[in-house]
Every structure is written in structure tokens, then in C-alpha cells.
Image (spheres, grey):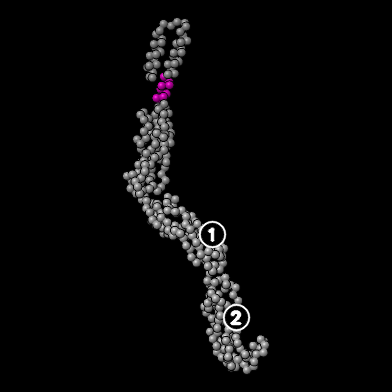
């Protein structure tokens, strides 16, 4: 209502013949006219409303995927009559984005006020964010070998001889930039602490990227544990003389041996009796004999020093063990 309309109402009420009982009615009419004018004009003044509007992304063409995480809502400010602004519903203003025409890679989409249907006599004056970033990639499928991740170590003296994984590979689907560079995919760590025997477990696969899909989420593994094979050097091993009927002297009296075998058994191996010469049937005199070494089953001699020893046999017969080594 314009001010002229108000003046018209006031003049019309003033032109009537006044009577003493109409004074109150006249005052009431004036108050109502002024109130109506204020209400109508206040509703027509410009107001501002802030709204949070959801964003809807249309489906991509088959074989494509959005790699990043674009915004799911946008904030706008709308100006217009307060009565019209109060009728706005953010859900009905949903911003619809169709990325079907976008090529793989990074794309920027500008958001304009015209993309919001706010109705007549209202205007979108602010948008945040006013630009959306979409990162699009091709979906690819590829078979990738499974790698068993482990933590801690097997018991001392033991080693992992082999690992069997079933299935040995899994099919992965995901963005090409993530799937194509993969050389393997790892499992959750398997604890091997203190193992001395084979073990079988089912372990989960850990995808390197949460956007990837797997043909299976777990694999069955068997870890085969064996005694570690190592070398041990024995120094100052006494050279024994077997089957001698005479007193004797052997030079050198001690040898150095390197023996290969399971670490646990080597640790408990005593050197006594490992090195010897055979004097069976030898007559008194000086003899150069090969140093012989005997090792338990499952072990082997790697090297020895010396290869030969000199054995001097005396004419005096042995009577006691103390007589074996005359001074």
C-alpha cells in the first residue's frame, strides 16, 4: 500500500459527518490503516536468507569413477521479500550436476545463480563454494599377486623355508592411476614370533586404496618353517688316534673344522671325536696320514685344517690309556 492510499483513507474518514460516538471508531480506523500500510511495505522490503542446498551428482558413464570427494552441499544467500523467502525449501533447490560430458582428469565446474530455481522477485546473491572440482578416472580390472606381510621372527635357529598362498593373486578393480602401478597387494601382518613348526592361517587383504574393489577379502596361507642351515667353526679340536697297538705321538695335536648343518643341532654338537687318524695295522715308525672327520647325519664338513698329520708309532706296546702319548 502506497502512502497516497493511506491519505485517501484518512481523508475519506475525515469527510464524514462526525458525531460524538464516532470518535473512537475513527481512531481505530486510522490505527488499522497505518498498521496495514506498515505490514504491506515491510513485506515488500528486501530481506536476506541463508540456505544450505544439497548437491546431486548424476551417474557417470559406465567404466568411469569420481576419484576425489567433491562437496555434497553448497551455501547460498537469497534476497527478496521476507514472505517469499520464508517459502524457500533447500531440498527443492537441489543443485544437480551432470558430469557425463567430462573427460578423465581434473575438471572445474562453475556454479551460477541461475542454477537455483528460487522463483520470481528473489535473487541468489552469494554462493559458497562457487566452483566444484571433480577428478574423474577410468575403471580398470587387473590380477595382482598377494604378498604376505609378517611381523616378528621365528624362533632362533629356525627360518621360513617357503610360503604358500591360496589364491596366489586377486582381481582388483579401481581407478587406473591406482591399479595399474601395483606390483602386489599385501595382507594384514601375520605374527611369526617364536614359531618352530609349520603354521596355516586365514588372513585379510589390505587394499592400498579404499576406492578399490577385490575379488576376495582374504587368503589362506601356509608358512613352512625349517631349521636354519648355518656354518659353525670348531677350533682346537683334539686329533684322536684309533686302533693303535703302540704308543704314539701325533702332530699337530689339534685341528680346526668348519661344519654345516641345522643351527639348533650345531649349537649342541660336541667336538670330541670329530677328528681322528686310523692307525689300524700300522707298524712302528713315522707315518703321514690323512686327517679324517666324522660328522652326524644331516651335517657336512665344509673345511678342515690340517688335511694331513704326522703319526709316530713307538715299539713299546700300549698297556693303559695314559701310555698313548709318551712325552
Position of 141 with respect to 205 (left or right) is left
Instruction: Please give the name of the residue rendered at 37% of the width and 32% of the height, measured from the top-left corner.
Output: 118
Instruction: Please give the name of the residue rendered at 44% of the width and 58% of the height, measured from the top-left corner.
Output: 167
Residue 119: x and y in percent read: 36, 30
Sort mark 2 into few (<14), some (14-19) or many (20+) by Cα contacts within 10 Å. some
Magenta stretch: residue 41 in it? yes
Residue 279: x and y in percent read: 58, 88
Query: Considering depth in this image, is 181 or 228 the residue closer to the camera?
Result: 228
Q: Quadrant of the C terminus?
A: bottom right
By secondary structure, the bulk of the magenta-drawn segment is best described as helix
Element carrying mark 1 = strand
Element carrying mark 2 = loop
Query: Considering depth in this image, is 288 or 143 the residue closer to the camera?
Result: 143
Instruction: Please give the name of the residue rendered at 41% of the width and 19% of the height, measured from the top-left corner.
Output: 37
Q: Which numbered dot is residue 191?
A: 1
Magenta stretch: residue 175 in it? no
Q: Quadrant of the N terminus?
A: top left
Q: Which numbered dot is residue 165?
A: none
Q: Look at the picture and state if 46 lies above or below 165.
A: above
Say which quarter of the image contains residue 280: bottom right
Q: Look at the picture and state if 41 lies above or below 259.
A: above
Q: Earlier in the sequence, mark 1 or mark 2?
A: 1
Dot 1 and dot 2 residues touching (CB under 8 Å): no
Sort mark 1 into few (<14), some (14-19) or many (20+) by Cα contacts within 10 Å. few
Q: Look at the picture and state if 6 lies above or below 221.
A: above
Magenta span:
37-45
Say which quarter of the image contains residue 248: bottom right
Report the residue marked by disc 2: 273
Q: Look at the picture and state if 194 lies above or below 103.
A: below
Query: Considering depth in this image, is 206 or 113 the residue closer to the camera?
Result: 206
Residue 92 appears in the figure? yes
Amino acid at each position: 500500500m502506497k502512502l497516497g492510499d493511506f491519505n485517501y483513507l484518512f481523508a475519506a474518514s475525515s469527510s464524514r459527518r462526525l458525531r460524538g460516538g464516532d470518535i473512537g471508531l475513527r481512531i481505530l480506523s486510522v490505527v488499522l490503516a497505518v498498521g496495514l500500510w506498515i505490514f504491506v511495505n515491510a513485506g515488500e522490503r528486501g530481506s536476506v536468507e541463508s540456505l544450505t542446498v544439497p548437491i546431486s551428482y548424476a551417474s557417470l558413464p559406465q567404466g568411469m569413477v569420481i576419484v576425489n570427494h567433491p562437496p555434497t552441499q553448497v551455501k547460498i544467500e537469497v534476497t527478496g521479500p521476507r514472505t517469499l523467502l520464508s517459502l524457500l525449501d533447500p531440498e527443492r533447490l537441489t543443485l544437480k550436476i551432470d558430469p557425463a560430458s567430462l573427460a578423465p582428469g581434473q575438471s572445474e565446474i562453475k556454479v551460477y545463480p541461475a542454477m537455483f530455481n528460487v522463483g520470481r522477485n528473489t535473487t541468489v546473491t552469494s554462493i559458497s563454494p562457487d566452483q566444484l572440482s571433480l577428478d574423474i578416472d577410468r575403471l580398470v580390472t587387473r590380477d595382482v599377486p598377494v604378498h604376505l606381510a609378517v611381523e616378528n621372527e621365528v624362533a632362533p635357529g629356525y627360518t621360513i623355508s617357503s610360503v604358500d598362498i591360496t589364491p596366489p593373486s586377486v582381481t582388483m578393480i579401481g581407478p587406473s592411476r591406482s591399479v595399474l602401478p601395483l606390483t602386489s597387494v599385501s595382507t594384514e601382518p601375520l605374527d611369526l614370533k617364536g614359531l618352530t613348526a609349520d603354521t596355516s592361517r586365514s588372513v585379510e587383504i589390505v587394499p592400498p586404496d579404499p576406492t578399490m574393489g577385490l575379488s576376495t577379502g582374504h587368503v589362506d596361507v601356509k608358512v613352512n618353517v625349517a631349521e636354519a642351515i648355518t656354518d659353525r667353526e670348531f677350533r682346537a679340536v683334539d686329533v684322536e688316534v684309533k686302533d693303535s697297538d703302540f704308543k704314539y705321538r701325533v702332530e699337530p695335536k689339534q685341528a680346526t673344522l668348519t661344519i654345516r648343518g641345522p643351527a639348533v643341532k650345531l649349537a649342541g654338537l660336541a667336538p670330541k671325536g670329530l677328528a681322528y687318524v686310523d692307525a689300524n695295522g700300522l707298524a712302528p715308525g713315522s707315518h703321514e696320514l690323512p686327517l679324517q672327520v666324522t660328522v652326524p647325519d644331516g651335517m657336512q664338513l665344509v673345511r678342515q685344517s690340517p688335511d694331513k698329520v704326522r703319526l709316530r708309532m713307538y715299539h713299546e706296546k700300549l698297556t693303559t690309556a695314559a701310555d698313548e702319548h709318551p712325552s
